[in-house]
Structure formats: structure tokens, C-alpha cells
Image (cartoon, rainbow, N blue to C red):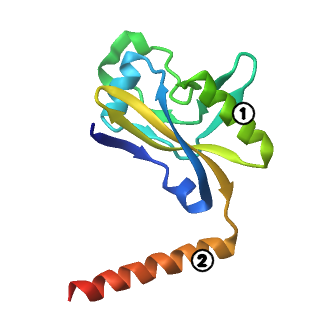
């Protein structure tokens, strides 16, 4: 099973600490699937909301460009429309429970294809403070220097 990464939310990885991850399917139209597989998807500014009656999880703010060859089928296409995430009932109830514990955010981390399907990796996240971001930067810099010295 190979993952072909279509989009990555780098800002979320920089600004938030990941506490837990889930893999969810993405409910798309045929033209949206083709556009996503061409890499015409952007997760910048997107987030995940949970509705409790009936329990469902939605991706908001993700931009999937209009597929050029779709023609008349996409006459009134909205690239920022809400898209439903496909999860089990147990996963949805655990997300609802964990979301209510603290002031946490649920955000998409990756969009990728697994076999023929378009999947989203979502994460339960907690905001980082400024000193946490600096600490992470120092760690990454140290690892880079260490790798350079080992290559010599």
C-alpha cells in the first residue's frame, strides 16, 4: 500500500502539536477526485468540524480547483464547499469526546491516495507557544548539523 501525497498542511505542523491522528475517507464528486489526483488541492486555512446530530465530521475551507475537462457538470462549482469525512461511528464518538476535554483543534494534515481512494489524515492538535516553536527549530537545526558531520 503506497501513499501518494497530494497536499500537506505544513502550517498546521508548525503551529500545533499533534496529540492523535486518524485516517478518513473524503466524500468527493468525480471531477473533484480527478482535480485532487492532479494535485489541485490546497489545505491552507482548512479545518475540521464535528456535528453531533447526526454524528458526522466535515472538512471546511479546503480548496479543490475546478477540473478543466468537467465541462457543464461543474457549472455552479464552489471550490471551498464543505466536504464530509468518512469515519466509523466509534471514531466519530472518540473524536467528539476528546474534542470536549480541552480547547483542542482538529485539522487536516495530509491528503493522499491510498490505492484508488482519496484519504485525509486528520489530527487532534494543541496550539504551540512561541518558545515551543523556537525549541523545535533548534532541534531540527541540531539534527541537520549532525547529519552533515556524519556525511563527512
On residue 72, which mark appears?
A: none
**Which quadrant is home to the N terminus?**
top left
Mark positioned earlier in the residue sequence (1 or 2):
1
- Depth check, front residue: 88 or 127: 88
Disc 2: which residue:
134
- Seen from this angle, which residue lies furthest top? 72
Picture residue at 59% right of the left edge, 48% below the top:
20
Circles 1, 2 touching at the beta carbon (< 8 Å): no
In this view, 57 is above or below 101: above
Picture residue at 59% right of the left edge, 77% below the top:
134
- Horizontal side, residue 101 vs residue 26: left or right: right
* Gap in angstroms between the C-alphas marked 1 and 2: 31 Å
Disc 1: which residue:
96
Image spot of residue 11 (x, y percent): 54, 56
In this view, 71 is above or below 82: above
Picture residue at 72% right of the left edge, 33% below the top:
96
- Depth check, front residue: 73 or 113: 113
Image spot of residue 45 (x, y percent): 59, 45
In this view, 131 is above or below 9: below
- Horizontal side, residue 133 vs residue 127: left or right: left
Q: Is residue 106 visible?
A: yes
**Which quadrant is home to the C terminus?**
bottom left
Image spot of residue 77 (x, y percent): 49, 19
Amino acid at each position: 500500500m503506497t501513499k501518494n501525497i497530494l497536499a500537506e498542511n505544513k502550517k498546521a505542523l508548525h503551529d500545533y502539536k499533534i496529540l492523535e491522528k486518524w485516517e478518513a475517507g473524503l466524500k468527493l464528486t468525480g471531477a473533484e477526485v480527478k482535480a485532487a489526483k492532479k494535485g489541485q488541492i490546497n489545505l491552507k486555512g482548512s479545518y475540521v468540524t464535528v456535528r453531533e446530530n447526526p454524528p458526522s465530521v466535515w472538512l471546511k475551507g479546503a480548496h479543490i480547483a475546478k477540473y478543466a475537462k468537467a465541462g457543464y457538470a461543474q457549472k455552479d462549482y464552489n471550490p471551498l464547499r464543505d466536504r464530509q469525512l468518512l469515519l466509523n461511528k466509534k471514531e466519530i464518538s472518540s473524536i467528539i469526546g476528546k474534542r470536549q476535554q480541552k480547547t483542542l483543534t482538529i485539522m487536516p494534515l495530509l491528503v493522499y491516495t491510498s490505492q484508488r481512494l482519496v484519504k485525509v489524515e486528520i489530527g487532534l492538535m494543541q496550539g504551540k507557544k512561541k518558545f515551543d516553536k523556537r525549541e523545535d527549530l533548534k532541534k531540527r537545526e541540531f539534527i541537520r548539523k549532525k547529519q552533515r558531520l556524519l556525511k563527512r
